[in-house]
Image (cartoon, grey):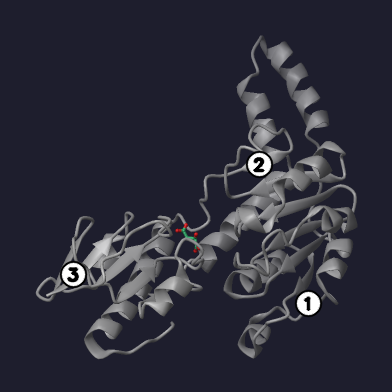
Amino acid sequence: MYKILTLNNISPKGLSRFPLDHYEVSSEMREPDAVVVRSFKMHDMALADTVKAIGRAGAGVNNIPVEAMTAQGVVVFNAPGANANAVKELVLAGILLAARHICAAWDYTRGLAGTDAELNKQVEEGKKKFAGFELPGRTLGVLGLGAIGVKVANAARALGMNVLGYDPHMTVDRAWQLDSGVQQAAGIDDLLARSDMVTFHVPLNDATRHLIRADRLRIMKPGAVLLNFAREGIVDEAAVVEALNQGHLRTYVCDFPSNTLQGHPKVIALPHLGASTQEAEENCAIMVADQIRDYLENGNIRHS
Ligand code: MLT
């Protein structure tokens, strides 16, 4: 029997890929052969030396000490692209939330009270206060054109936006998937300088930590919107707060809560919902379960 330890709630559909006659799957397991994890931070965890593989049911592996694991001979799998559609849809929502002040307007509407005449007056005030902007003709900068970035870029084109993309590591396959209307920026700074809204889809690593910092925020257009559906460490949050306070940045939309940003009126923050759809959770869990099985049973290391 192979033993699989789960460290987060993992989609039952994914876990059902481990046949019960050969696998034992549990969130409490002393000497597992493999671990399936979602966002649980594994850096301080003492791992039994029976573990041969770790499957990250998601794209980012920054919650796993990959180098240390690799040095111990533990293979780390992840599920790139399996939740790309879910993230894309939330990025589109973020773009619309920012363009139309939807969160602030919703708060405002919930607080309305009075007679019909008073409500009408408050509605008129709300219309002035929360006037937004439309997307066609605006430029979205997409930094990182992997599975998620390409989907975001193409969807923004479908909404009529101009799209500027940049990715120094873009593969030929991805280039073929990209809408022909997506223009290539000359580099990060060029992309920041020419975009009304900027979204980035890159992993968090030593090269991308604080990629978006004070000097880069200054390059952005006054009134620009920054969207972060990747990882919080990619952005210097203190610099973002300063840019928001100075009015240089209009809105920061991010998929993480943070003490630095908490309660800021120009921040729209979500509790890391990008991959939180039933479909994405299933896709990710199925992908890593299949990878782990193939490794444990056949010794194959495949990255889907
Ligand atoms: C990812 O890296 O794909 C996400 O963090 C997935 C998740 O929310 O678990």
Q: Residue drawn at (64%, 86%), measured in percent from left and top? A: 171
- Observer-side mark, 3 or 2, equals 3
Q: Residue drawn at (37%, 74%), measured in percent from left and top? A: 287
Q: Earlier in the sequence, mark 1 or mark 2?
A: 1
Q: Is residue 132 visible?
A: no
Q: Which residue is mark 3?
A: 3
- Observer-side mark, 1 or 2, equals 2
Q: Residue drawn at (65%, 90%), measured in percent from left and top? A: 172
Q: Which residue is mark 2?
A: 268
Q: Residue drawn at (18%, 61%), measured in percent from left and top? A: 30
Indicate the secondary structure of the residue bearing disc 1.
loop
Q: Which residue is mark 1?
A: 181
Q: Earlier in the sequence, mark 1 or mark 3?
A: 3
Quadrant in the rendering for residue 161? bottom right
Q: Earlier in the sequence, mark 3 or mark 2?
A: 3
Q: Nearer the viewer, residue 173 or 1?
A: 1
